[in-house]
Image: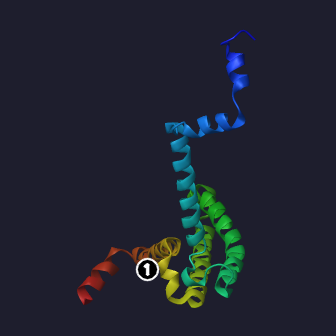
Amino acid sequence: APPGSMMQVISSLSLTDVMANIQSIPPSPLSQAVSAKSTLENRVAQLLKKASFGMGDHALGSTASRGDRLLSVLVDPVILLNAVQLGFCVDAEGLGLEAACKASEHCFISIYLVELILKVAVCRGSYFRSLWNLLDFGLLLSAIVDSWILDPLTNFGVNVLGNIMLVR
């Protein structure tokens, strides 16, 4: 190779020189972003793992955690069936399924209520420390109010509500 050519410079460098030069290069914005993304992903994974069963103090391997997983195996197919039922019941009048939709709605609410009671019995106070459990509780409460309280009152007519207000 001619003197001063790139090949002569490269061949004269030792592995130690190359490694020292590589380590002295400041991190690029891209490598910093990749590192931050990796750190964020790890933190999100830790948070999801912590909240995965909503078991609080009963996490990872305790009987409550196993019980919750077993309950999940039993309730997950019910959730899938409920989604299918909701799809059919969107046009219940057109399909002539009003009565079947109402009956199945009451069955699903009853199943979810039993699930809630079992989870609260197993988890005790830690049940309400999980945001997922609070979401489930809120959804179930709104379904109960809608289907078991407001719907029967509106089926009797507005006069029932007026009479209740009068008695109050």
In-image side of 147 versus 15 (left or right): left
Q: Position of residue 71 (x, y in %)?
A: 68, 79
In-image side of 74 versus 145 (left or right): right
The front one of 88 and 138 is: 138
Identity of the residue drawn at 71% across and 25% down: 12
Residue farthest right in this picture? 1
Q: Position of residue 75 (x, y in %)?
A: 67, 74
In-image side of 55 versus 14 (left or right): left
Identity of the residue drawn at 52% across and 82% down: 127
User: Which amino acid type is shown beneath numbered disc 1?
Assistant: Ile
Residue farthest top in this picture? 2
The front one of 100 and 8 is: 8
Residue that numbered label 1 is attached to:
149
Is 91 above or below relative to 162? above
Identify the image quadrant of residue 62: bottom right
Neighbours of disc 1 within 10 Å: few (<14), some (14-19), many (20+): few
The front one of 123 and 167 is: 123
Question: Circle 1 sits in a helix, a strand or a loop, which is it?
Answer: helix
Q: Point out the image quarter for the N terminus.
A: top right
Identity of the residue drawn at 67% across and 75% down: 72
Q: Position of residue 29 (x, y in %)?
A: 49, 38
Q: Position of residue 38 (x, y in %)?
A: 57, 51
Identify the image quadrant of residue 112: bottom right
The total number of labels drawn is: 1
Q: Point out the image quarter for the C terminus.
A: bottom left
Identify the image quadrant of residue 142: bottom left
Q: How is the image coloured?
A: rainbow
